[in-house]
Amino acid sequence: IKYTFMKKIIQLIFISFLVFTFSRCNDDETSIEQPQEFLTDIDGNVYKTVTIGNQTWMAENLKVTTFKDGMSITQFAFGENWNQDNQTFPFYTWAATSDLNNIYDQELPEDFYGALYNEATIASGKIAPEGWRIPTLQDWMELKNFISNEGNSGNVGTTLKSSNGWISFSGNGSDLFEFNGLPNGYTNNFGGATGSESIATWATTEIDHVNRIRKVANIYKTTLDFADNSSLLGSGIRCIKE
């Protein structure tokens, strides 16, 4: 009797092991069938991407410094005219990484937050990688509506923010959708990078040429908003897949 009882115990343990192993294999197969998609720009920079609802977005800020036609974008230097009196001369500058609030233990690379681009660069139509584009206002609103309908109304910004790197009064996010919205800041009228660690800004295609205003998607605290920014300011870019 004891032998029969022990035999049944061993059989149960063996069956449990097979079930566990089969389950792990299925999990592994699922992860293989749904690989992380990456995007490479003309400079060779590789970006993570994320699908949210019916849209696929870059999960990092754009940092390309070459147009799709091979023309280099000039890196802005102090003393140059960021806007060239509103003429079409493209500039980029790196978002500020000085970490004045001591959020990080290590020194940040200059492209950590991605680049900030002036109006001529954003309006060129040549900066998004092949198969991608600068999002429209409607694209951003679709993203906002999807996240709101997932039970995050009034808290969309928090779900899109990175889970660390934000100054305390603005607050870290949950990064619920793995969008990894870093606080890249913006540039002032003269090309000075500012606002990192407290606000995120990304350009849309909406521009009022008469009043020199471009609509920009931004996150400050908990919400995703759409501001009428002077086209003299610079902002970051998150591309969306065509």
Image (tube, rainbow, N blue to C red):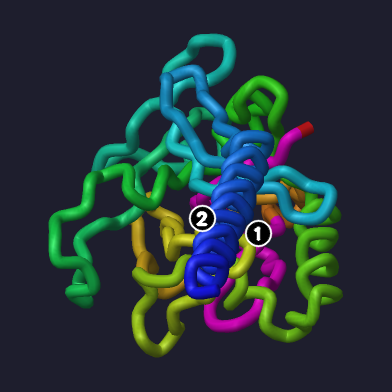
Instruction: Judge by depth and name the residue closer to the eye, 73 or 172.
Output: 172
Quadrant for residue 100, please give it. bottom left
Q: Secondary structure at mark 1?
A: strand
Decide which of tag 1 and tag 2 comes sooner along the chain. 1
Instruction: Look at the image and say whether residue 70 sits in the magenta stretch.
Output: no
Q: Residue 199, percent across and down?
A: 47, 70
Q: Is residue 130 toward the left or the right of residue 181 in the image?
A: right
| Whether residue 179 is visible | no
Classify the position of the C terminus by image quarter.
Answer: top right
The residue indicated by pointer 2 is: 233
Instruction: Judge by depth and name the residue closer to the eye, 51 or 20.
Output: 20
- Start and end of the magenta stretch? 215-241
Q: Is residue 24 toward the left or the right of residue 74 in the image?
A: right
Residue drawn at 23 percent across, 46 percent down: 109
| Rendered position, 148 above or below 65 | below
Residue at the extreme top: 70
Q: Residue 162, percent across and down?
A: 47, 66
Q: Residue 140, percent across and down?
A: 76, 57
Question: Which is in the foreground here, disc 1 or disc 2?
Answer: 1
The disc labelled 2 sits on which kind of residue?
A: Leu
Residue drawn at 81 percent across, 55 percent down: 53
The residue indicated by pointer 1 is: 216
Residue drawn at 67 percent across, 82 percent down: 155
Residue drawn at 79 percent across, 81 percent down: 151
Distance from Cα at disc 1 to Cα at disc 2:
10 Å
- Give me the disc on residue 170: none
| Rendered position, 22 above or below 194 | above
